[in-house]
Image (tube, helix red, strand yellow):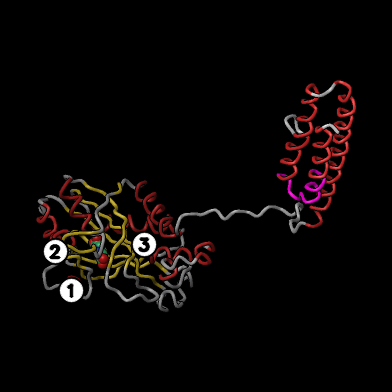
Amino acid sequence: MSTLLTRLDELRDKAFGELKNLTSATDLEAFRVKYLGRKGAITGVLRELGSIEPEQRANVGAEANKLKNELTSAFEKHQESLKSKSIPDSKVDLTLPGRSRFLGKKHPISRTIDDIIDIFYSLGFSVAEGPDVETEWYNFDALNTPDDHPARDLADTFYIKDNILLRTHTSPVQIRTMENNKPPVRIIAPGRCYRKDTPDASHAPNFFQTEGLYVDKDVTFSDLKGVINIFARRLFGPEIKVRFRPHFFPFTEPSAEYDFSCLICKGDGCRACKHTGWVEISGAGMVDPAVFEAVGYDPEKYTGYAFGMGVDRITMLRYGIADIRYLYDNDLRVLRGI
Ligand code: DAH
């Protein structure tokens, strides 16, 4: 018997044997290429017809074509049966709507800072920055904060080494700005601050402030009140009330703190405002002449106001968050809901 016929017999056994076990589209395609393709095994036999006795060619050719036809129709049948099986068998319901992806968004603190910047920018302020790691000079001395001030205590401040510390407020940016610019200056400086506070509902060892500074001739306390009132209304709407209370800061004279009316209880008193109807937002005041002297400004010629607002407090008020730790825990259930 012709060796080609033997090969066709072997091919038939092998191919039909393999076909039954194919389950995936990739396997099916590999099978088709291997046996039925233009360079496949059956075409290979047909190509060799020229090398055998002429009287055997017709017979071997017919056998090869027969095998090709049979295998093709068996292949197609198997392919069909896999297709019809795969849908009911599959756990995927192709008619279901797709799963929507969770799109990230800015952290509430970043959103508050962006909005604060927008408002002050529209009032003529520009944004200044300073380093998180500061020297005692910028963080304390230049701000008229003497050696024996409690804020300088090891228990209150993260020291890196002598004289170098994590800034406890954004006020050092006032000094850096005035050192490098002649008046008038009108800046805000948002950024991170660090204090050795034990975390609780209203304290976190790192938090955010936005410093503000306006120095020019004839700047007065009423300019400060006017700007803060405009800021509060732009951020929270026309119902917000602002109150100033006397206070003390070494770098301002006179000094004050200002509060916003609590928007969570509308002033009636709730946990968030410790039942006072007011939420403390910021320290503020008129820049102390000693600070002007430290940076080489003439206190006889210039006056200025400054403030340092708690960004976290404002964020909590805006989004009705009762505990500052929610802002730092990275709990997506909280952050997604805001
Ligand atoms: N730096 C102060 C603090 O962290 C806040 C402050 C008070 C900033 C008065 C000021 C200011 O610019 O004038 O408590």
Which residue has dot 3 on it?
A: 311
Judge whether 17 appears above or below 256 on screen: above
Query: Residue at 80% of width from left, 27% of height from top?
Result: 46
| Residue 184 spot, x, y in % from top left | 20, 46
Q: Are marks 2 and 3 in contact (CB under 8 Å)?
A: no
Which residue has dot 2 on it?
A: 163
Q: Does the closest atom of ligand 1 sit within 8 Å of the Cβ of label 1?
A: no
**Three-letter code, disc 2:** Asn
Judge whether 287 appears above or below 47 on screen: below
Which corner quadrant of the image does residue 107 belong to?
bottom left
Query: Residue at 38% of width from left, 70% of height from top?
Result: 279
Query: Residue at 10% of width from left, 53% of height from top?
Result: 300
Q: Nearer the viewer, mark 3 or mark 1?
A: 1
Q: Secondary structure at mark 3?
A: helix
Query: Residue at 75% of width from left, 52% of height from top?
Result: 94
- In this picture, which residue range is highlighted in magenta? 15-26
Query: Which is nearer the eye, 321 or 152?
Result: 152
Judge whether 299 appears above or below 43 on screen: below
Residue 232: mark in rendering? none
The answer for how far apart the CA atoms under marks 2 and 1 are is 12 Å
Q: Which part of the image, by quadrant, shows the N terminus?
A: top right
Which residue has dot 1 on it?
A: 153
Residues packed near mark 3 inside 10 Å, few (<14), some (14 to 19) or many (20 plus):
many
